[in-house]
Amino acid sequence: MEFKVSKDLIQQLEEHIVKKNDKELEILLNDLHHADIAEILDELDFDDATYIFKVLDSDKTAEILLELEDDLRENILSRLSPKEIAEELDELETNDAADIIAELSQDIKAEVISELNDVEHAKDIVELLRYDENTAGGLMGKELVKVNENWNVLTCVKEMRIQAENVSRVHSIYVVDDENRLKGRLSLKDLLTTSTKTQIGDIYIRKLNFVNVDTEDVEVARIMQKYDLEAIPVVDELGRLVGRITIDDIVDVIKDEADKDYQLAAGITQDVESNDSVLELTKARLPWLLIGMVIEIVASFVLKGNETTFQKYSTLIIFVPLLSATAGNIGVQASAIVVQGLANGTLKQFSRGYFSKEITVSMISGTIISLLLLGYHSVMYQQYLVGMAISISMIVVILFAATLGTLVPLFLHKNKIDPAIATGPFITTTNDVFGIMLYFGVAKLILGF
């Protein structure tokens, strides 16, 4: 059952904080998962959250630190000494510790690293800090279990027992050569059912998915998703095993990428959250609103240029909002499917087959909408030629919107621009201008105006 923060619990905690009842605080929180405690701390003010954080043991607070909202984590870290921060990081795996250190100022980073008790742990963290956070190197952890292809099974088991002490979860057993180059992986079943004198080189599995330290995080996520992997090894330029990435790190990448794409699709240009300041939210949302305003002003000039047309055929102007909404929806639907295909790898570039399919779907949808529109116009206004002009114009505009919605994301993707930007205001506002131009252009041809 999922834990929910209650007002009663918050009230109890606040009372114990006021009375400095540290034992009672520990009892209340001791059996809770670190993610639940982080959720509770996010509900408290900074002072109370920091007090509770210092009361709990570092083996628990280290995990809590990873789950906290960015503002609260930054505030708590600012109230801890370099030694206290180092105590937290000693409890974390290298990739998580590196993520925390990366948030600190340069001066504090050096002090914290110097306070770490485990020298090897500190060296691994420093190595990870060299990599870009959006690459496999920035995601990977150094904790893993590896065996040499020249060992026998008995030696392998002994070495694995030693290595496993520093690994919270053993996802895979990797096989390397004398130069630490990745060769394959070892099946636990083969290890348990094979003679202790058998060479590892005779039983390991050579087929193995891996990524390079410079592989982009979204590509790592795609590979792990495609092959349903719980972990994937990371190698350097020489093929040497340097770390591994686990599924929990990839879930965060997938979530962050989905959040970014959703915001781009909504016309938000920066990564923001609901608890950000008014200024940050405004800066993120205003650019596309201004761009949309300029494009809609252009659309208004198109309408003005056709003023004599809709003065003679007044019903033409009545259906402009319907035209804009339908074209916008068609364009967004088309672009959303393309962006999804690009994201999951089912669509890598322009495909005539897919383009034909999208145009066919839009043609069928446009025909049905146009026939309904023709029937409605004929019943309401008894202007059959005008109704025909509106209906045919609607089909043309829908086909244009589908073409734009399909090709623009592919063009952006080819030019290394996030195609998610084409699923929101860009498509709808662009369709408004060109859609209205096509609408009146086709209508004029049919009406002989």
Image (cartoon, grey):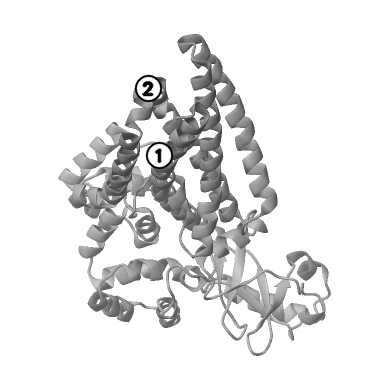
For numbered disc 1, what is the local secondary structure?
helix
Residue located at (48% from left, 68% from top): 139
**From the viewer's perspective, is 44 left or right of 329?**
left
Q: Name the residue under label 2.
A: 312
In this rendering, which labeled residue sits more in front, label 1 or label 2? Answer: 2
Amino acid type, mark 2:
Lys
Q: Which of pointers 1 and 2 lies earlier in the amino acid sequence?
A: 2
Q: Mark 1 points at which residue?
A: 432
Q: Is residue 442 placed above or below 61 in the rendered structure?
A: above
Q: Is residue 306 placed above or below 52 in the rendered structure?
A: above
Q: Give the tally of numbered discs.
A: 2
Residue 97 in view (yes/no): yes
Neighbour tally class for label 2: few under 14, some 14-19, many 20 plus, Cα within 10 Å: few
| 3D distance between C-alphas at marks 1 and 2 | 22 Å
**From the viewer's perspective, is 324 left or right of 368?**
left
Residue 262 % position (x, y): 43, 47
